[in-house]
Image (tube, grey):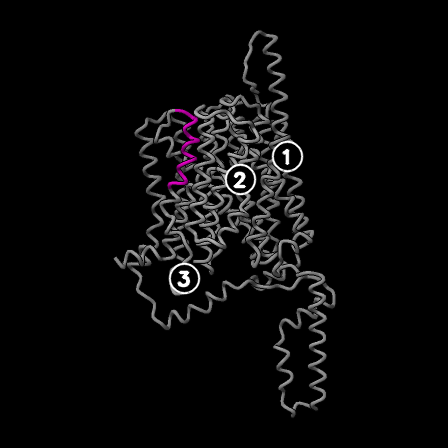
Amino acid sequence: MGWVKGFVGHRWVVFVCAMWDMSFAGTSYMFGSISPVIKSSMGFNQKQVAFLSVAKDLGDNVGLLAGKISQASPVWGLILVGVVQNVVGYGLVWLVVTHQFPALPLWLLCIVIFVGQNGSTYYNTAALVSCVQSFPESRGPVVGILKGFVGLSGAIWTQLIAMIQLPDQASLIFIIAVGPAMVSLTFMFIIRPVESYRQSRSSDGTGFTFIYSICLLLAAYLMGVLLLENMFDLDQSTITLFAVILIILIFLPIIVPILLVFFSGPQSADQEALLEPPMLEATKPKHFVGESSTSTTKVTKHFENEKNPSKLEVLPLSEGPRDVFQFQARLWQAVTKAVKKIKRKNGPHRGEDFTLSQAMAKADFWVMFFSLVMGCGSGLTIINNMGQICQSLGDNNVNVYVSVISISNFLGRVGGGYFSEVIVRNFGYPRLAALAVIQAGMSLGLCYYVLGLVGQVYVVAISNGFGYGAHWSIALAAASELFGLKNFGTLYNFLTMASPAGSLFLSGFVASTIYDYYAEQQAKHQMLTGNNNDLLLCEGNICFSITFGILAVVCLCAASLSLIVAHRTRKFYAQLYGESRT
């Protein structure tokens, strides 16, 4: 059974299992499907549902504890903590909604849903840490693919649930409670960091290309299935066939490790020795000198490229008098010491390794953060309110739109990263310029909804799903370039807080307040006409059109902030990627 152990211990098997885990871990995007049943069962108004969605968003993005545990615990322990939180949190929500457990006050229910959704941060951390350490030379593709599958999981779950035929909508909460946990337990002892450099092959690039092809095929297939289900009344056997094909597509990436393990000859010792240095070099963070024009920065840039000053003291006497060399050595040491003191005082420059506190002292960091607050907050507001948006328009296809958002989110994470790479490498523009373009596109999609044109829900689902996903591939890559890789985990966890922060204001106050206002006005009108409905519901385009108009302006403000960062960092990016374009 040695070949089984060798196969399971291969880093490509770890990566594929992490992909499968992420394919079912993105349950946060399914809140739009479960929020109507929570609202009706608990008798909540829209503002109370919005607070639940904010608690869910906080649980999905606050991963600081998961990061700390990952430093002191093996990966299987990290996954186990996530499983417990996932099952206990969403299990309690299911029991409360089905009235098998006494009703909880809103604040306590917010804590419960926070705990349940926070389990996904442990799955994400386990997968990302394991795969980034196993593929140190391919961090970009690895993170992009894993994050993409998280965004795609909502559409995957929708198709599987259609095959299962749940008895009621409340059962979907039970699926969210136990489904991701069961998948994670299956791969708990497989997903782990693997020694990478001796498993590196020249065929790795082909492997990633194949995985990308599967990702695009999967997204196209899901979109086609959704269109067929929306246009035609398909029977259950056809829906089951579509789900089986989907499962086959999800399993296809296992072909890559099978070919690499069983059909790729082992490398010779000489070849592995040649592979080792680049792998080690790829794991080292690059340091770039900032664009300051002060003499201190120029001196720093010059001295960083010089050899060790101690070598000056061992120069041969034939080069000049001894006292001259001693004077030069002392002068060198004095200048170097002064430069280090100045750098400690002023902090690192763009491209060097920042700590969180050092990054928070920079204007670029905060402008980028508030751009994410506005952009991600707008996208998340639409995702969380999709159930009520469809309900207000009398559209019962909420699961279809949740799937469309999920697929668009996936394409945004993959396509946004590719688009930003073209921007920086081919044109030398700052990466945040690409984000500004996408945020402007989100604003146009919202304006389309405000006008009430044909297919408005599809347009807003696609444009904002794509835009929301693109934030996480573009902004995080830009953060790693501007603030370094050494403390990227801490910076990443802080930046993800922008999403629930924006949702707290835009969804928890703006969208819910406007919705409840028009719902109350319609309820008063119904009482005057003799139609009394205990549940406070809003009907018509007016329920969200004003909110979307506000969000459109917010997205334009986010684009303006992104352009500010792009303008401030244009010289840095010209220096950083100038050589790749020449």
Q: In which quarter of the image is residue 534?
A: top right
Q: Is residue 312 left or right of residue 382?
A: right
Res. 460 visible in picture: no
Task: Name the secondary structure under disc 2.
Answer: helix
Res. 406 visible in picture: yes
Q: Is 157 drawn above or below residue 292 in the view shown?
A: above
Q: Residue 505 carries which label?
A: 1
Distance from disc 3 to disc 2, alpha carbons, whole Å, reads 32 Å
Q: Which mark is residue 12?
A: none
Task: Name the secondary structure under disc 1.
Answer: helix
Task: Name the secondary structure under disc 3.
Answer: loop
Q: Which mark is residue 195?
A: 3
Residue at the spot x=61%, y=35% of the render? Answer: 504
Image quadrant holding the N terminus, namely bottom left
Q: Seen from this angle, which residue lies furthest front?
A: 102
The amino acid type of the residue labelled 2 equals Gly
Q: Seen from this angle, which residue lies furthest right?
A: 294
x and y percentages locating residue 18 in the rendered image: 41, 49
Residue at the spot x=64%, y=83% of the render? Answer: 312
Membership of 325 in magenta stretch: no
Q: Is residue 206 left or right of residue 482?
A: left
Q: Is residue 153 left or right of residue 247?
A: right
Marks 3 and 2, the one that precedes in the sequence: 2
The amino acid type of the residue labelled 3 equals Glu
Q: Is 382 drawn above or below residue 119 in the view shown?
A: above
Does the residue at mark 2 contact the one at mark 1 (Cβ under 8 Å)?
no
Distance from disc 3 to disc 1, alpha carbons, whole Å, reads 45 Å
